[in-house]
Image (tube, helix red, strand yellow):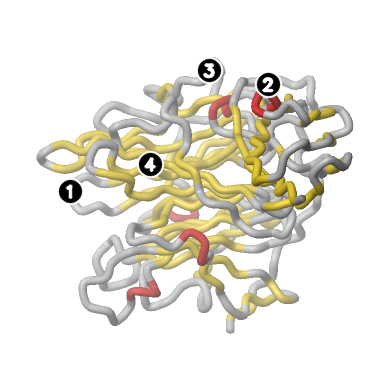
Amino acid sequence: MTKIILPLILILHSCISSTETTNYLGQTYPDSIPVIFAPGIVSMEGRLEHGISFTPDTRELAFGVFNRDDFSGEIFYSRRINEAWTEPMVFEPLKNKCVYLPYFSPNGKSLLYTQSKPDIDNMQTDIWMVEKIDDEWGTPKIIRAPISSTSREANACMTYDGTIYFSSNRNCYGKDNCHTADLFYTKPIGNEYQSENVISEFISPNDEESVFISPKEDYIIFCRYTDNKTGVDLYISYRDINKKWIEPQIIDSTINSKDWDRRPFVSIDNKFLFFTRLQIGEKGLTESDIYWVNTSKLFKPFVYHSLPDTTTVQVGEKFEISLPKDYFKDIDGNLLTYRVNLDKFDWLSFDSEQMKLSGKPSVDGDFEVTLTAIDKFSNKTEDKIIIKVKK
């Protein structure tokens, strides 16, 4: 059992005024097609960058750099003073350490990262943390069990309440020919992390790694091997009203590519997705850059508060079914348009303002009704219910 003094996480989600223009190293904001982030400053040709994170006030950033020869890693850091960003340099508290994948906590007072285990190859890593005290970064400390273990922990991130999500291959430990990683989380009890839980909904034969959890814990992004054509892709899942994770969906093809897309990070205002794109050739890793894109094709409506799959009504009798106003949700907006496949049913009506289905069926049978939610970017999500009409 590890005792950690958790930094105070205030539910002040952002200090940025809605009218303030956020300065990302002076870069022009991207549209829905990913572009390299800060070329020549962060993403340099021939250098292997991976994983970037910003503090919630977007005044500090950190990102990782691989060494091509031995896959050791460094973390670079920059801060914005007035409106000018400092040149990214090796992060002083972690200088001469083999470190990877920085992630700022949602209050900007801590930096989570991974560090190679001593006297083992560089890719075997534990989860570490360095905290800011009086505006100065302090002494790094390992986060011991139940987070770090004898296995490999690949990266970690944190929610507003201090819950840590991380990837680990601990479920393979001691098994022959087993190398896959899964996603875990651990909630603080007082000042302690006492036990970890695997996210069982996401377990697959492939790795689940590169986890990003939203500070409000309402969505999660991670990477998974998809197929030989596209390699590793980014996936997203949302939590429903019962706090269950829905089936992960591969992120839109405008974002994922034929290269390896990993290491996601979303800005605190949910407007931009940052991720790492690796180019893998016949001789292995040839390039690794950090990309960014706006989230118009990332977030799509999702089923948040659904009805039971089947509703039973009587033939020849009027009925009314009230749908929850939050049947669908959308991370980046509440203005959804709803449609129902009424063309198949001359006895069915739908009031989108009141979210009510009504009608007077004339025949018995099982009728599949498709509900569609459309967001302001024309992203669509469907859900189906069965109206069982009985005599």
Quick one: label 4 or label 3, which is nearer the N terminus? Answer: 3
Q: Residue furthest left?
A: 282
Q: Residue furthest bottom?
A: 1
Tag 2: amino acid: Lys
Cα separation, mark 1 vs mark 4, equals 25 Å
Callout 2: helix, strand or loop?
loop
Residue at which label 1 appears: 69
Q: Quadrant of the N terminus?
A: bottom right
Nearest-to-viewer mark from 4 and 3: 4
Give the residue at x 56% y 48%: 237
| Residue 386 x %, y % | 67, 46
Q: Are marks 1 and 4 in contact (CB under 8 Å)?
A: no
Tag 3: amino acid: Asp
> How crowded is the residue under tag 4: few (<14 C-alpha within 10 Å), some, or many (20+)?
many
Q: Are marks 4 and 3 in contact (CB under 8 Å)?
A: no
Cα separation, mark 4 vs mark 3, equals 20 Å
Q: Are marks 1 and 2 in contact (CB under 8 Å)?
A: no
Q: Residue 376: which numbered mark, if any? A: 2
Tag 1: amino acid: Asp
Callout 4: helix, strand or loop?
strand
Quick one: label 3 or label 2, which is nearer the N terminus? Answer: 3
| Residue 79 x %, y % | 58, 35
Residue at which label 3 appears: 31
Q: Residue 194: which numbered mark, if any? A: none
Residue at which label 4 appears: 233
> How crowded is the residue under tag 2: few (<14 C-alpha within 10 Å), some, or many (20+)?
some
Nearest-to-viewer mark from 3 and 2: 2
Is residue 196 among what the camera can see? yes
Cα separation, mark 1 vs mark 2, equals 46 Å
Cα separation, mark 1 vs mark 3, equals 35 Å
